[in-house]
Image (cartoon, helix red, strand yellow):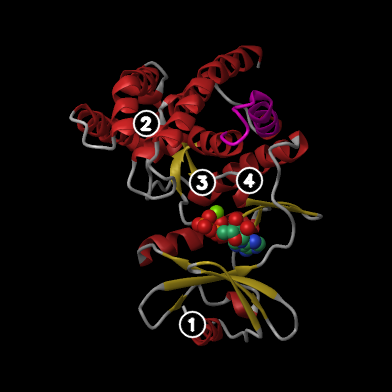
Amino acid sequence: MSTTNVKKIVKQFGIKASAQKRIRGGIYRIVTPEGRKFCLKRMTKQIARLRWIDRMLMHVQRSGPLLAWRNPQNPEGRKPHAISQKGEFFVLTPWISGREPSPLSLTDMRACGIALARFHKAGQNALKGDISHSQIGMWYSTLHSRQQYIQKKIAKAKTNSFSLPISRFIQRHGPEILRYANQAKALLRSSGYESYRQSPRKNGVLCHGDGGPSNFILNENGTYLIDFETLHVDLRAYDLYRVIYNSCKDYRWDFSIAKAILDGYREVAKLKKTDYKLIRVWLRFPFTTYLVLSPFKRFPFTESRLQWALDSERRITSFLHKLEEYETRH
Ligand SMILES: Nc1ncnc2c1ncn2[C@@H]1O[C@H](COP(=O)(O)OP(=O)(O)O)[C@@H](O)[C@H]1O
Ligand SMILES: [Mg+2]
């Protein structure tokens, strides 16, 4: 988007941009002539969903948790969103100065766990039993359709439809990958999920949906959450899984990272047996492999990427044993 167009959108919020920096497509850091900093972000959501996200976050923010969201008391926070010439929605939030938490710091990870639990607590009051935008009932179908996707790729590999090294790799390791997917589904069946999903009003929380080091910011005020495009209602295990996955995936699945996150979370809220099992369900699904196979070009589709993903899935096996031990101890 051009500098002029960014300026026009920012103007709709009643502020002037004297400087702008593109963070990525659709995300800009805006500086006003007085030196105040904001984040302008395109939200690719339907208007009803955007209104719901806005309502929920303003409620949560009022009850304590630190979030990068608008404050309707401030002049620039009065307007929930602006619309570009192309008809896209943009939100303006304060720019939070600080640093990303590091998975190498257990103190940082504990802080993330605490912030997530506080967010869930505050979200429960915001929801007041309203379970629109819930994904609680979709766990089986999500896992199943991802598994089917993997199966399709395995079938293609059998006819050598990919390059020879890739086809051979998938032929050789396909059964192992599918075993992990089946284990995830079996875990789900024996987890207590059914009874949770039957009382969504009791068990649903407001889930961030994509927690992880890049969506927390630490500064002297505390731990902020940012990036709310994936906000939805779900079981809290889903958020814990996301934070654990995103924090551990690049650190060889070192369980001490997850332990710090869970320790932090448990300082604020208790976890039940079923919660731990539900976290294990998502971790056991071969999601990293799924991402490499999938068309979102986040990862190149190469043999070395597939090997990297498989190594990750294998590390998760012992990681899950440690999670079970952790569960038994607490
Ligand atoms: N309000 C904000 N304050 C400070 N940094 C931000 C803010 N919004 C985004 N960022 C920075 O930009 C990055 C990408 O923004 P984010 O909203 O997380 O988008 P994405 O959907 O790409 O994850 C963040 O990881 C963070 O470093
Ligand atoms: Mg993000």
Residue 228 seen = no
Measured from the top left, where is residue 82 in percent x and y?
Answer: 47, 78
Measured from the top left, where is residue 4 in percent x and y?
Answer: 51, 87
Q: CA distance from mark 4 to mark 1?
A: 30 Å
- Position above or below: 322 against 75: above
Residue that mark 3 sits on: 210
Residue that mark 1 sits on: 2
Residue drawn at x 48%, y 28% is: 283
Residue drawn at x 65%, y 53% is: 63
Q: CA distance from mark 2 to mark 3?
A: 21 Å
Q: Quadrant of residue 142?
A: top left
Residue 318 marker: none
**Circles 2, 1 touching at the beta carbon (< 8 Å):** no
**Circles 3, 4 touching at the beta carbon (< 8 Å):** no
**Circles 4, 2 touching at the beta carbon (< 8 Å):** no
| Residue furthest front in the image | 164
